[in-house]
Amino acid sequence: MNGKDFRIRLIVLLLLCAAMIVILALGYRNRPTVRAAPTPTPTPAPIATPAGPAPQAVERVLQTLIAKGAKVEPRDGFAGKYPIYLAVMGNKIVGAAFAINAAGDNLGLPPILMGLDAEGRILGLAVSGAPASKPGVAKDLAALEAWLPQLASKDNQPRTLANTKWRLKEDRGEIDPPAAGQAIRPRAVLLAVRDGLSWFRAHRGELLSGVVSRPGRAANPAAEAGGAPEPNLPRSKPFPR
């Protein structure tokens, strides 16, 4: 190999090396940028609608006490319930109303409002707001409203946590399912009513004493002194029909 051929091969080799460097540099420059997905902020499912139940629904479920002269006072931040409505007669709390998340927003029906007297007896149940504008919802809503009175009383007596088997008859309970309503999940509704009654029983003494905890503070005053906090209302989840 003469000197001229060697120089030519060396130049070709250098050009190939330079081309590979350029190709690698362009590939690195144009590589896709992988960005970490932002961490979503958890949003707790509301127990009641943010705007609160309609005033007409509150009056319906507390009508028995209102007829006797009770005044309804809205409160917030009580033991995880927002909002809650207290029926006050004189200086005494004689009942309460609050929303239970039974129907579920995914079914297009609004939550249900429960009214109780001071002993935990159901005074009334009512749909607490306007339904979502979806086809067929109006019919399901009418079926739900027609079914709720069965859950409020039996034999002309108010239902309570103790005097009712909060299950469908087919589940060895004592409640007939609604006659219609594709969006209604009766087992979820019964579970929510039972949980609402359990929540009231757990917080009854605190509630009737007029102690109202603010957001960020313990629901039970004993918890602020280092005692065990009261249990929060269990979250109601829709069950299959």
Image (tube, helix red, strand yellow):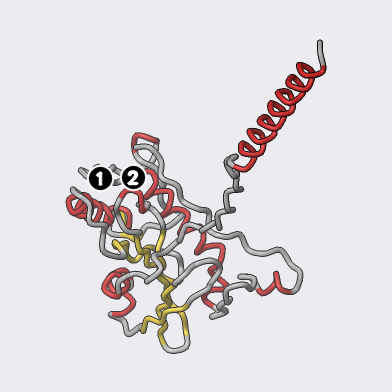
Vertical position of residue 187 compared to residue 104: above or below = above
Front residue of 18 and 70: 18
Front residue of 120 and 157: 120
| 164 relative position to 231: left or right | left
Q: Residue furthest top?
A: 1
Q: Residue furthest bottom?
A: 90
- Alpha carbons under labels 2 and 1: distance apart: 7 Å
**Residue at 53% from the left image edge and 54% from the top image edge:** 234
Please state the horizontal and vertical placement of residue 149, each as a whole percent of the image.
26, 57
**Residue at 36% from the left image edge and 84% from the top image edge:** 71
Determine whether label 2 and label 1 are within 8 Å by CB.
Answer: yes
Vertical position of residue 136 compared to residue 27: above or below = below
In the picture, which quadrant includes the N terminus? top right
**Residue at 43% from the left image edge and 77% from the top image edge:** 86
Vertical position of residue 202 compared to residue 221: above or below = above
| 39 relative position to 64: left or right | right
**Quadrant of residue 109 within the rendered picture:** bottom left
**Residue at 68% from the left image edge and 29% from the top image edge:** 20
| 127 relative position to 194: left or right | left
Please state the horizontal and vertical placement of residue 98, each as a whole percent of the image.
41, 67
Q: Amino acid at mark 1?
A: Pro
Q: Amino acid at mark 2?
A: Pro
Q: Which mark is residue 178?
A: 1
Mark 2 = which residue? 186
Q: Which mark is residue 217?
A: none
Please state the horizontal and vertical placement of residue 206, each as a whole percent of the image.
57, 73
Q: Earlier in the sequence, mark 2 or mark 1?
A: 1
Q: Callout 1: few (<14), some (14-19), or many (20+) C-alpha neighbours within 10 Å?
A: some
On the question of residue 63 being in view, the answer is no
